[in-house]
Image (spheres, rainbow, N blue to C red):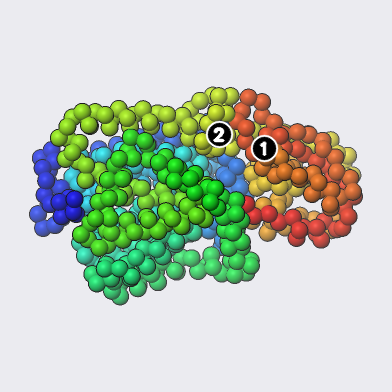
């Protein structure tokens, strides 16, 4: 099927897919209802369980606003700071912004179907297909970068589809702005933009879509990331070392199968046929710029499979475009045979219900252990108050004269964030940490520290940590074990709290050797 077959006027509940003069059909108002339902669902579950380890870290980052960080740019921590100012330490307040991003992504999915020539039915199908993506619901339940990244990728693809349909290259300026802003939520948006730019310049689309506006769009994309690049240049280009650490942890041949299988879970299972049809359509399209999207998908699929295969959600934003294209392509087929449509509706309902149980806090906390191996989201939102209580017991158990020269040190950024956010106002000092940007904020009192209360996750996540501490301290005593009875087996379960005394060197001299990127 060619794109001409898709974009020609077609009957759709009395509407045309593309109106006279090449204008697309009006946006189906039901799309807003789907977006509102996603927003309402996410907010309804926003206060269950607790804050995620990433959210605790982002709140810490929000209290240390800077031009960039080791593992993400500035905009997500900036939104976390807005949440802190408006709502304090509130899971519901913090998760308002990713829920809005998810609702916006649903609307973008429908708009993309509209640009492909779809009228009411395919627009609604694209909205539902986007709304039921497990990766959308799971990522938008917590406030890290993924929900914003998904929206940015989907919006970039929407603009590219529009340029391909209209030939109006003025939209490259908007595409550049979206790449730049998206890259300030997550660096992956810049990779997507670079691959798209290469696909345009090196392929047939160059003859119709590459002009000075494309160059201006590329320059616009660079402007928002200049502060990020400045910060990275002053911190040893930490993002590259961080990338190497992530690739070592999540990449390699052993994770390629994980990546391939994981892509089947980007949409609900019943919608796989829809995005596959969309990808096939884009690849065979007569519009070179639309083919660039299929080419970008293929290049990024291989790149991420080899480098970061276990991070299966890296391509999530592109599936919004593929689902939109597939919704338009399959519209006639679905409505020609009502059995097919009923099967798709039933399959979508069942697979969405199953995935929601896995990625959202639907079950009681004691019943989510089985979901952790599929999606760790719910598991990593449990146990933090108990951890803070354990650390507080250890801290207050130290004599006052020893506390005066002591520091709380966390191996994991979630632990440091838990102490600093959930332990705020309880008498605990500000914790320091060794992971990612935590390390760059320093060791606290570099000279006076003689006692370190060290927190470490379970041995599966960080094996041999006690032996490592003994390299720096003459006396290391395990004083507490981290646990969350009945909850998920997250990375903290089986971890320990240590009291470390007798530093072999000054704490400030030890600090440079403790840095960990993961």
Q: Quadrant of residue 29?
A: top left
457 over 450 or under it: above or below: above
Residue 316 image point, x, y percent = 41, 48
211 over 515 or under it: above or below: below
Q: In which quarter of the image is residue 152?
A: bottom left
Task: Identify the disc placed on residue 492.
Answer: 1
**Residue name at image x 42 percent, y 53 percent:** 301
200 over 151 or under it: above or below: below
Q: In which quarter of the image is residue 364?
A: top right
Mark closer to the observer (1, 2): 2
Task: Identify the disc placed on residue 388.
Answer: none
Along the polypeptide, which appears first: circle 1 or circle 2?
2
Pointer 1: residues within 10 angstroms few (<14), some, or many (20+)? many
Left/right placement of residue 201 relative to residue 414 reads left
Report the residue marked by disc 2: 372
Residue 13 image point, x, y percent = 13, 38
Residue 311 image point, x, y percent = 51, 48
Q: How far apart are marks 1 and 2 (CA)?
A: 13 Å
Left/right placement of residue 275 relative to residue 96 reads left
**Residue name at image x 66 percent, y 26 percent:** 485
Q: Is residue 473 visible to the viewer in this orientation of the structure?
A: yes
**Residue name at image x 40 percent, y 28 percent:** 353
């Amino acid at each position: 099927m060619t794109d001409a077959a898709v974009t020609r006027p077609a009957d759709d509940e009395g509407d045309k897919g593309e109106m006279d003069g090449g204008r697309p059909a009006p946006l189906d108002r039901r799309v807003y209802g789907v977006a509102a339902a996603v927003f309402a669902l996410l907010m309804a579950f926003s206060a269950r369980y607790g804050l995620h380890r990433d959210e605790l870290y982002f709140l810490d980052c929000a209290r240390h606003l800077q031009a960039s960080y080791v593992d993400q740019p500035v905009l997500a921590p900036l939104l976390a700071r807005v949440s802190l100012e408006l709502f304090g330490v509130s899971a519901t307040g913090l998760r308002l912004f990713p829920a809005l991003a998810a609702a916006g992504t649903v609307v973008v999915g429908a708009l993309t179907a509209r640009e492909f020539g779809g009228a009411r039915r395919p627009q609604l199908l694209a909205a539902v297909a986007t709304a039921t993506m497990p990766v959308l619901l799971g990522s938008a339940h917590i406030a890290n970068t993924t929900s914003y990244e998904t929206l940015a990728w989907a919006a970039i693809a929407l603009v590219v589809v529009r340029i391909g349909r209209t030939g109006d290259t003025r939209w490259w300026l908007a595409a550049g702005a979206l790449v730049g802003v998206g890259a300030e939520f997550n660096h992956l948006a810049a990779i997507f933009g670079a691959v798209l730019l290469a696909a345009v310049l090196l392929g047939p689309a160059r003859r119709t879509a590459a002009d000075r506006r494309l160059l201006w769009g590329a320059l616009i994309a660079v402007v928002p990331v200049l502060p990020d690049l400045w910060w990275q240049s002053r911190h040893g280009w930490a993002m590259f070392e961080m990338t190497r650490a992530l690739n070592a942890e999540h990449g390699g041949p052993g994770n390629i199968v994980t990546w391939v299988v994981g892509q089947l879970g980007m949409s609900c299972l019943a919608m796989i046929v829809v995005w596959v049809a969309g990808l096939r359509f884009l690849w065979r399209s007569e519009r070179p710029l639309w083919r660039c999207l299929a080419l970008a998908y293929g290049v990024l699929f291989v790149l991420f499979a080899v480098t970061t295969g276990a991070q299966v959600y890296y391509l999530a934003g592109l599936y919004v475009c593929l689902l939109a294209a597939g919704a338009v392509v399959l519209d006639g087929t679905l409505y020609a045979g009502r059995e097919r449509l009923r099967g798709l509706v039933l399959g979508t309902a069942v697979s969405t219900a199953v995935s929601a149980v896995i990625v959202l806090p639907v079950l009681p906390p004691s019943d989510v252990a089985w979901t952790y191996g599929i999606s760790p989201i719910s598991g990593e939102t449990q146990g933090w108050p108990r951890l803070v209580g354990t650390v507080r017991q250890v801290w207050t158990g130290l004599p006052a004269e020893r506390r005066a020269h002591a520091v709380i040190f966390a191996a994991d950024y979630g632990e440091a964030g838990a102490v600093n956010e959930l332990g705020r106002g309880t008498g605990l000092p500000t914790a320091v940490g060794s992971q990612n940007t935590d390390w760059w904020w320093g060791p606290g009192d570099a000279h006076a520290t003689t006692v370190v209360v060290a927190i470490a996750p379970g041995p599966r996540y960080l094996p041999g940590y006690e032996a490592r501490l003994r390299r720096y301290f003459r006396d290391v005593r395990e004083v507490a074990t981290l646990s969350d009875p009945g909850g998920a087996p997250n990375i903290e379960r089986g971890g320990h709290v240590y009291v470390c005394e007798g530093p072999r060197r000054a704490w400030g001299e030890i600090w440079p050797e403790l840095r960990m990127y993961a």
